[in-house]
Structures are given as C-alpha cells and as structure tokens.
Image: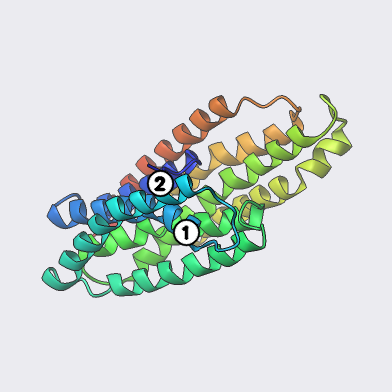
Amino acid sequence: MIFPKEHGSWAILLVPFLIGAKIGGGFDIKTVLFLVSVLSIFLAYQPALMLAKSRLKISSENVKDALNSLFIFAPFGIFSSIILIFYFKLYGLLLFGFIGLVAFFVQLYLARLNLDKTQGGQLFAMSMLVMTAPSAYYVCKGEFNLIMLQLYFLNLIFFGSGIVYVRMKIAALAAKRDKFTLAEKLFIGRYNIAYHIAILLLIGALFVHGSIGFLIFLAFLPIIVHSIMGTFMLERKVKFKRLGWIETIYSILFAIMMIIEFRKNLP
C-alpha cells in the first residue's frame, strides 16, 4: 500500500475541509460521503502519479503496490462522487473534479521537470489541497457564493505560510554552517520575510476595510510572528517533528477562529 509521505499534507487537506463543512452548516450524510470521496482521491493520487510517470524508473514491486493502492482507493472516491453528483444533484462538483484533473496533469508535468518538490511546486500542490474548503462548503449549501472564494483565499495564504517557512528551514539545513550572520539569515529567509510581511499588510487592509473580522485577523498573527522571528533565530539545526506539531496547533487555532467568525456573521 502506498500512502502520502508528506505528513503535513493531511493537515492541509483536512483542516480546510473542516472549516468549509462547519461554516456550511455542519456534518450530514452528504458531508460524510464527500469526506470519503476526498480521502479516497487523495490516497489514490500518489499511486496514479507514480504510474503516470512513464520515464520514472520504479521497480515492478512498486508498480504492483501502486496498482493495488489505486484499485483499492479509487472506487470509493468514484462511487461517493457519483452519489453526490447524481442523487443529491450537486453538479457543481463536476467543476471541482475538472480543476482536480487539470491539476493532476500540471503536477505530472512539474514532476517530469523535477519541479514538483520545489517551493513553487509545493505551493501549487497546496493550492489544490485547500480546495476542500470551498468544495465542502458547496456540498453543505448546494450553491456557489462569495463565501467559497473567501474560504479558498484565506486558507490559501494561511497554509502557504507553512510551506514557505519550512522551505527556509530546509535551505538552512542544506548550508554548510551551523550558525549564520544576520545578513545570511536575511538572505536565506528573504522569501519567508517577504511572504509574511505581504500577508500582514493584506489581512490588515482587509480588516480595516471590514472584509474580515477581528478573529480572522488574529488567526494569522501567530504564524506571521513565528515565521519572522524564526528568520532572525535561524540556525542549521532543525527539529522538523516539533515544527510539524507547532504548525498543526496554529492550523487548529486558525480553523476555530475562522469557524467562529464566519458562523456569527451568517444569516
């Protein structure tokens, strides 16, 4: 059986799903079916990508594992999706499915160019995973509206933070020195600082304009402060397990604040 190696991708997949479902109205049979579909497609994605990489040299045993995983996971996703689309008449899921199919081929193209593990490639993959927020909301509501775009955008910039920050840590790990000068820290963390200053300015402007509530503004502050401080405290030694737990805690706090803020403003 083949499972995703990037453990952080589970949080990026499921936290936005939880946000979208709770803001959309909570869990019912449709939401459960959609969760089954999302998990099945997510688990089938890696085996399908492995099989699609025609130039990738993988052993016959890995090919067998990929086929077995694909045939186990894919039917659950297909069957659940068919029920949602044709029984519950959620035809908008066809649009999300089309976007996912296009994203698969883009990811395959990036993999063949060895760009899928770059910062840009990981940001692209993340941008597809957080689609669970607007899609779960749509499944609950059965209609498209502006809240779906808001959910997608806010989840996109939030979870992009973790990827940019971890990439900075990986760059520091790849360096030959255990300690860095301030100039070196700023150089290694230049994208990280730029990203989080941009987030701060953006959410600050949205808050002042009244487009987001105070709790949502507050939800972004921990990751902004942590990431910028992390640049100035940068060293080669990285505890990725500890970092993963910190990012997970921030994600949970983000979800709670998002749900509270959106739910209190819903009619």
**Residue 51: which disc?**
1
Q: Residue at x 77, y 36 (%)?
A: 174
Q: Is residue 114 left or right of residue 181?
A: left
Q: Whole-percent x and y of residue 246?
A: 52, 30
Q: Is residue 178 left or right of residue 100?
A: right
Q: Residue at x 57, y 30 (%)?
A: 243
Mark 2, residues whose alpha carbon is within 10 Å: few (<14), some, or many (≥20)?
some
For mark 2, what is the residue? Answer: 65
Q: Whole-percent x and y of residue 216?
A: 44, 48
Q: Amino acid at mark 2?
A: Asp
Q: Quadrant of the C terminus?
A: bottom left
Q: Is residue 13 left or right of residue 55?
A: left
Q: Whole-percent x and y of residue 19?
A: 33, 49
Q: Residue at x 59, y 46 (%)?
A: 163
Give the alpha-carbon distance from disc 1 to disc 2, as whole Å. Answer: 10 Å
Closer to the camera in the image, 64 or 151: 64
Q: Can the viewer see residue 145 in this picture?
A: yes
1 and 2 marks in contact (CB < 8 Å): no
Callout count: 2
Q: Amino acid at mark 1?
A: Leu
Where on the picture, by quarter, is residue 178?
Answer: top right
Q: Considering the numbered disc 2 on the image, is that residue within a helix, a strand or a loop?
A: helix
Q: Is residue 165 left or right of residue 141?
A: right
Q: Whole-percent x and y of residue 242?
A: 55, 25
Closer to the camera in the image, 150 or 171: 171
Q: Quadrant of the N terminus?
A: top left
Q: Residue at x 71, y 24 (%)?
A: 237
Q: Earlier in the sequence, mark 1 or mark 2?
A: 1
257 up-or-down from 146: above or below: above
Mark 1, residues whose alpha carbon is within 10 Å: few (<14), some, or many (≥20)?
some
